[in-house]
Image (cartoon, grey):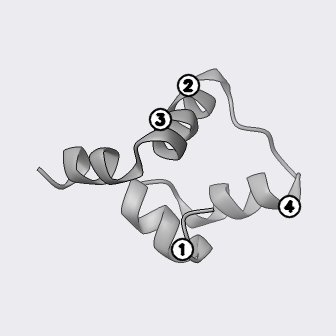
Amino acid sequence: MLGLSQEQFADAYGIPLRTVQSWEQGVRQPDATARSYLKAIGKIPAQVRNALAR
């Protein structure tokens, strides 16, 4: 979606790589907070990254 590898996505948005992998493999589902965060990333990825970099 964003053109990032799992590792790049995890690093860019402060999510453990194993968590991202578990979500993509269907082993785990994101909780409500994570779903909201992922929704924000999906809509405004650059702004989320910028906010985290400050």
Q: Is residue 51 left or right of residue 32?
A: left
**Mark 2, other Cα within 10 Å: few <14 / some 14–19 / many ≥20:** few
Mark 3 residue element? helix
Report how far apart the C-alphas of labels 3 and 1 lie in the structure: 16 Å
Query: Which is nearer the N-term, disc 3 or disc 4?
Result: 4
Query: Which is nearer the N-term, disc 3 or disc 1?
Result: 1
Residue at coordinates 41% horizontally, 50% vertically from top-left?
A: 45
Mark 2 residue element? helix
Q: x and y percent of residue 6 in the render? A: 60, 71
Q: x and y percent of residue 25 in the render? A: 86, 61
Q: x and y percent of residue 12 in the render? A: 38, 63
Residue at coordinates 63% horizontally, 31% vertically from top-left?
A: 35
In the image, what residue type sits under mark 3?
Answer: Ala
In the image, what residue type sits under mark 1?
Answer: Leu
In the image, what residue type sits under mark 2?
Answer: Thr
Residue at coordinates 41% horizontally, 67% vertically from top-left?
A: 11
**Mark 1, other Cα within 10 Å: few <14 / some 14–19 / many ≥20:** few
Residue at coordinates 58% horizontally, 66% vertically from top-left?
A: 17
Q: For the residues labelled 3 and 4, say whether their Cβ atoms are less than 8 Å apart.
A: no
41 to 7, vertically: above or below: above
Report how far apart the C-alphas of labels 1 and 2 lie in the structure: 22 Å
- For disc 3, the marked residue is 40
Q: For the residues labelled 4 and 2, say whether their Cβ atoms are less than 8 Å apart.
A: no
- For disc 4, the marked residue is 25
Residue 33's label in the rendered image is 2
- For disc 1, the marked residue is 4
Report how far apart the C-alphas of labels 4 and 2 lie in the structure: 19 Å
Query: Which is nearer the N-term, disc 1 or disc 2?
Result: 1
Query: Which is nearer the N-term, disc 4 or disc 2?
Result: 4
